[in-house]
Amino acid sequence: MTTDLLDDTRSSWQALRPDLDTTPMATVGRILRIARLVTLFSDELLTAHGLTRGEFDVLSAVRRAPEPVTASHLARLLAASNASITKRLVALEAAGLATRERTSADRRIVTVQATAAGQARVDAALPAQLDLERALVDGLDARDRARLEASLRTVLVECERRVT
């Protein structure tokens, strides 16, 4: 069996603290490490499209929405801080890929829409991003992939339950 960084980390902690069950560390640690690495790979890939992974995520969410979305909705949807969403929106707006408008009913609320250029940009980047993601899970057969998706869904539902 192949070992990874989390096996070493867990072994180190088990040696230092044999009184603790470090099993969750291996699972959650792998989820976190995969997320960080996928973000790095995505940032590298999306640079060719003039986007970071964070900007791609925002633009994708806005692109999928049938109506303008609020910045606070984007923050909740992407599990990001309002400040990080604002930073991404400023960059997307400066690039002409999104627009922000304050609502007339409540000037504190900002709605976001993708421009035609923003829609085209995310549409152009999506196939490459999907190819990357496909390559990362190609080592799993359909059955293993379905089991992994179901297990990750269970963990995600628990995490989201704790947020709301």
Image: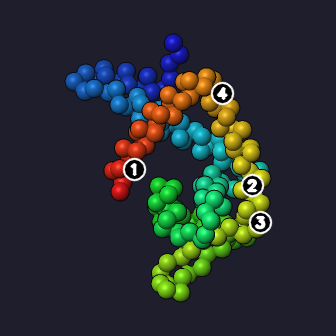
Residue at 35% x, 50% y is 161
| Image-based side of 16 in relation to 66, left or right | left
Residue 164 picture location, percent across and down: 35, 57
Residue 9 picture location, percent across and down: 41, 27
Q: Which residue is labeled 1 in the image? A: 160
Q: Nearer the viewer, residue 97 or 156?
A: 156
Q: Reading the chain from its start, which is encountered first: label 4 or label 1?
A: 4
Q: Which residue is labeled 4 in the image? A: 138
Structural crowding at the residue carrying mark 3, measured as other residues with C-alpha within 10 Å and reported as few (<14), some (14–19) or many (≥20):
few
Kindly indicate whether the residue at mark 1 contacts the one at mark 4 (C-beta within 8 angstroms): no
Q: Which residue is labeled 2 in the image? A: 123
Kindly indicate whether the residue at mark 1 contacts the one at mark 3 (C-beta within 8 angstroms): no
Label 1 SS? helix
**What type is the residue that disc 3 sits on?**
Ala
Residue 87 picture location, percent across and down: 57, 66
For the residues labelled 1 and 2, the Cα–Cα distance comes to: 28 Å
Residue at 65% x, 45% y is 42
Label 4 SS? loop
Query: Compared with residue 57, is residue 148 higher up or lower down, i.e. above or below?
Result: above
Q: Which residue is labeled 3 in the image? A: 117
Q: Reading the chain from its start, which is encountered first: label 2 or label 4?
A: 2
For the residues labelled 4 and 1, the Cα–Cα distance comes to: 27 Å
Label 2 SS? helix
| Image-based side of 61 in relation to 17, left or right | right
Residue at 58% x, 38% y is 37
Q: Reading the chain from its start, which is encountered first: label 3 or label 1?
A: 3
Q: Reading the chain from its start, which is encountered first: label 3 or label 4?
A: 3
Query: Compared with residue 130, is residue 13 higher up or lower down, i.e. above or below?
Result: above
